[in-house]
Image: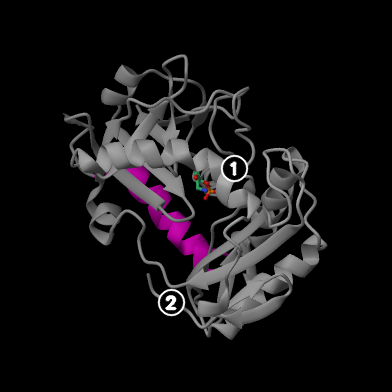
């Protein structure tokens, strides 16, 4: 990875190589941490802005609430810490990773250790490759199901839950695909290992509802708003794997993945096997929004 200069750790900016924790850190053993992935972009006016910082930080605190974890800072302090980290790293664009976790103290699953907080930022290009963004990726339905709503807490972005994502993503990439698509435990399409998922059929966008085991993606929220503003009908409903095979278009969204077209699933070409018009429109409008080119979405940007 591309190192940056500093990492914010428990209230202070420290040198990148000094941002360390004890090996008996609770979260390292049991996965009890919550995190966010946020992006900052250069904007049309020349300044840089973080995209939907408030919503990401609110989700971090909500995730912590679900885990009975008290983040030892007011939310405004961590907003500022994200911006301080970007500035300290001289970063006009990049990825920001806040993480709060149970630190060192006692061992045992139920130990309630002091909560540590860190915020790192570094340059990170297209998550599913530039080529993937442009031409679309190839995906595989995973043999692993997405989390059941009463096995894990799907509204929370919890570190340990990414074991499920890891298994699915590794299986897919080792099989020569770019990304995994996970079904829920009833067999309906849920999401990618780190992305929400959408199909387009006869001009309507379909995406699993938030009652499905999917993360309430902030990019999902942005994309649904963009679709509405573009007059593209959206239907939040469950759909089957074969409905996905028969879609006109398919795309995935996430802070890291942005808006990535999917051109093939399980060796079935989707539509014409290239990004379709609805996907391209959503992608174009999303990139305009993050780069501050659409005045009505200005409130999504925090300049720094
Ligand atoms: N689903 C999962 C499992 C994810 O990890 C992510 C990435 N955070 C998303 C969806 C997309 O969420 P967002 O748009 O908020 O990045």
SS at mark 2 in the image: loop
Q: How is the image coloured?
A: one colour
Quarter in which the C terminus is drawn = bottom right
Q: Which residue is mark 1?
A: 30
Q: Give the quadrant of residue 152.
A: top right
Q: From this view, report whether residue 17 is shown above or below residue 168.
A: below
**Which portion, as a residue range, is magenta?**
275-296
Q: Is residue 221 visible?
A: no
Question: Overall secondary structure of the magenta stretch?
Answer: helix
Q: Give the quadrant of residue 171.
A: top left
- Of pointers 1 and 2, the one earlier in the residue sequence: 2
Residue 3, numbered circle: 2
The residue shown at (56%, 81%) is 47
The residue shown at (73%, 38%) is 110
Residue 62 lies in the magenta stretch? no
SS at mark 1 in the image: helix
Q: Nearer the viewer, residue 278 or 182?
A: 182
Badge 2: residue crowd in 10 Å (few <14, some 14–19, many ≥20): few
Label 1 near ligand 1 (CB < 8 Å): no
Is 125 on the left-hand or right-hand side of 303?
Answer: left
The residue shown at (38%, 17%) is 240
In the image, residue 185 lies at what x, y percent? 47, 18
The residue shown at (79%, 66%) is 76
Badge 1: residue crowd in 10 Å (few <14, some 14–19, many ≥20): some
Dots 1, 2 in contact, CB < 8 A: no
In the image, residue 161 lies at what x, y percent? 53, 38
Quarter in which the N terminus is drawn = bottom left
In the image, residue 26 lies at what x, y percent? 64, 50
């Amino acid at each position: 990875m591309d190192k940056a200069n500093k990492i914010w750790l428990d209230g202070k900016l420290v040198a990148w190589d000094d941002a360390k924790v004890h090996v008996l850190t609770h979260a390292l053993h049991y996965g009890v941490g919550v995190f966010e992935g946020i992006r900052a972009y250069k904007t049309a006016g020349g300044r840089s802005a973080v995209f939907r910082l408030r919503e990401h930080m609110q989700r971090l605190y909500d995730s912590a609430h679900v885990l009975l974890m008290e983040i030892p800072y007011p939310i405004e302090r961590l907003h500022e810490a994200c911006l301080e980290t970007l500035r300290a790293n001289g970063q006009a664009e990049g990825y920001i990773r806040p993480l709060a976790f149970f630190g060192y103290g006692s061992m045992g699953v139920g130990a309630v250790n002091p909560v540590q907080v860190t915020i790192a930022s570094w340059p990170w290009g297209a998550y599913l490759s530039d080529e993937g963004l442009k031409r679309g990726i190839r995906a595989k339905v995973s043999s692993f199901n997405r989390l059941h709503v009463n096995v894990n807490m799907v509204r929370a972005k919890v570190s340990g839950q990414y074991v499920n994502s890891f298994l699915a993503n590794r299986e897919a990439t080792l099989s020569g695909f770019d990304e995994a698509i996970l079904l829920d435990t009833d067999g309906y399409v849920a999401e990618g290992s780190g992305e929400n998922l959408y199909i387009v059929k006869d001009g309507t966008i379909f995406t699993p509802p938030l009652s499905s085991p999917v993360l309430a993606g902030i990019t999902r929220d942005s994309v649904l708003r963009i679709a509405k503003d573009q007059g593209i009908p959206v239907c939040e409903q469950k759909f089957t794997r074969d409905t996905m095979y028969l879609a006109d278009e398919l795309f995935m969204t996430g802070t890291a993945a942005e808006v990535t077209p999917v051109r093939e699933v399980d060796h079935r070409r989707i539509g014409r096997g290239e990004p379709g018009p609805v996907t391209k429109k959503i992608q174009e409008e999303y990139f305009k929004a993050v780069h501050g080119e659409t005045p009505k979405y200005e409130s999504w940007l925090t300049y720094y």
